[in-house]
Image: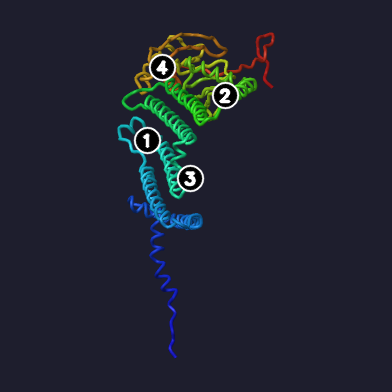
Amino acid sequence: MRRTEYRGPGRAEAFHQPLRRFQRRAGRKPEGVVSGVLVFLAQTWHLVAIVYVAALVLVWWSRPADSLGFMMAATLRSALAVLAGALVMILISRAMSRGVRLPDTTRARLPMLETRLNALAPNLLNALRIVVLIVILGLVAETWGVFDFRGWLSGEAGVAVVQAALSAALILLFAGLVWLAVSSWIEYKLNPTGGRIVSARTGTLLSLLRNAFTVVVVVMTAMLTLSAIGVNIAPLLAGAGVVGLAVGFGAQKLVQDIITGAFIQFENAMNTGDVVSAGGISGVVEKLTIRSVGLRDVSGTYHLIPFSSVDVVSNMMKDFAYHVADIGVAYREDTTQVKALMEEAFQELRAGELGAGIIGPLDMQGVTQLGDSAVTVRARIKTLPGKQWAVGRAFSEIVKRRFDAAGVEMPFPHMTLYFGEDKDGGAPPLR
C-alpha cells in the first residue's frame, strides 16, 4: 500500500510568504516616492477593494446596459485620482519628516525660530493633507456618479464654502506669520549675540510685551476666523462685554494688581535680578509678571506678592549703593587713630579683588553715637549695585584684623554690679 504525504499547508505557506514579506516592508519607513506609494497601497488595498466591489455591484444593479464601459472608465479615473493623491500625500509626509533647517548664523541669532517653524509647518501640511483628501474623495464620487463635485464647486454653495475656507486659512496663516515675526524680533532683542547688552528692564518689558501680544493675536484671530466662516460674532462680543463687566466687579483686586504692575514697570521700579523689598519682604526678584512679583529671600523661600499689596518698593540695585560701616570702639580709644585705621583698611580693600566694585573714596562721617559702652564711628563705601554686601563683609574683616594688631578695643556689652557703700566708704562684704 502506497503512503501519500499531504503537503497542502506547506504550499499555502510558500504562497503567503511573499505577501507577508511585503506587508512587513510596508511597516518600514519608505525611502523613495515609488516605494512610498507601494507602501500606501499595501496598507489600504483591502479597504479600496471592499469599496470597489460594493461599487461594482451597485453599478451593475442600477445600470446593467452600459455597466461594463462605465465601470472601466470610472475605475481608470478613480485609480488615477487615488494615485495622484497618494503621491501628493507622500510628498507632504516627506516634507514633514525633513522639517525646517535654518543656517547656523540664523540659529545663533534666533535660537527658537527653527523650533517655532517646525511647530507651525506640520499644521500647515496637515491642513493641506485634508484639502487633498477632500479633492480625491470628491473626484472619485463624481467619477462614479455619486456626487457632482465640480458642479458643486462652481455653484453658489461651493463658492461660498471655498471662499470661507480660504478666508479662514489666510487669516490663520497671516496671524501665525505676524506672531512668528514679533516673537522672533523680541527674541533677537533679548539675545546678547553680537555684543549687545540687554538691560533687565528691557528684558522684562519685552517678555511682558510678548505675552500680551500673544493674547491679543489669539483673541483677534479667533474672532476674525469665526466671522470669516459665517458665524455672527456680534452676540459673542455683547456676551463678552457682559462677562467682562461681571468679572470687573468680582475681580477688582485683579484689576488693581494689573494697573499697579503696569505703572511699576513703566516707572522701572524693579527688574528681574534686582534685590528689593516689597510688601514687607526682601529678596531677589526671580519672576515679574503684570500682576505679581516673585521674590526669593536669603533663606531660599520663594514669595509670590501681588502688586495690590505693594505700597512701597525699595530697590537696592539702582545706579549705585552704599555700605554703611558703624564701628564701635571703647571710650578710652583715640578716635583719630580709629579713623586712620579704617582708612588704611579701606585702601587695602580697594587694592584687592573687590576693588573693581568700589566707585568712590571712603566717606568718613566720624563719631555718630555715644552709646552705653562704645563710641560709634561711621564710614560709607560707595559701590556698584549689588556689590555692597560683599564689600561690607570684606571691610569688616580687615577692620577687625587691623584693630587687633593696633590694640584697639572693640567692646561688647558689660554689666557692672553695685552693692552700695557704708558710711566710711567701704563696700559691704559679698556673702
Q: Quadrant of residue 42?
A: bottom left
Amino acid found under the numbered disc labelled 3: Phe
The reply to whether the C-beta atoms of the residues labelled 4 and 3 are less than 8 Å apart is: no
- Mark 1 and mark 2 lie on one chain; the one further toward the N terminus is 1
Secondary structure category for the residue under label 4? strand
Q: CA distance from mark 2 to mark 3?
A: 36 Å
Counting other residues with Cα less than 10 Å from the Cα at mark 2, is it few (<14), some (14-19), or many (20 or more)? few
Secondary structure category for the residue under label 3? loop
Labels 2, 3: front one: 3
Labels 1, 3: front one: 3
The residue to which callout 2 is attached is: 234
- Mark 4 and mark 3 lie on one chain; the one further toward the N terminus is 3
In this view, the residue in front, 393 or 183, is: 183
Amino acid found under the numbered disc labelled 4: Thr
The reply to whether the C-beta atoms of the residues labelled 1 and 3 are less than 8 Å apart is: no
In the picture, the quarter occupied by the C terminus is top right
The residue to which callout 1 is attached is: 114
The residue to which callout 4 is attached is: 383
Q: Picture coordinates of residue 297 (x, y %)?
A: 53, 26
- Mark 1 and mark 4 lie on one chain; the one further toward the N terminus is 1
The residue to which callout 3 is attached is: 147
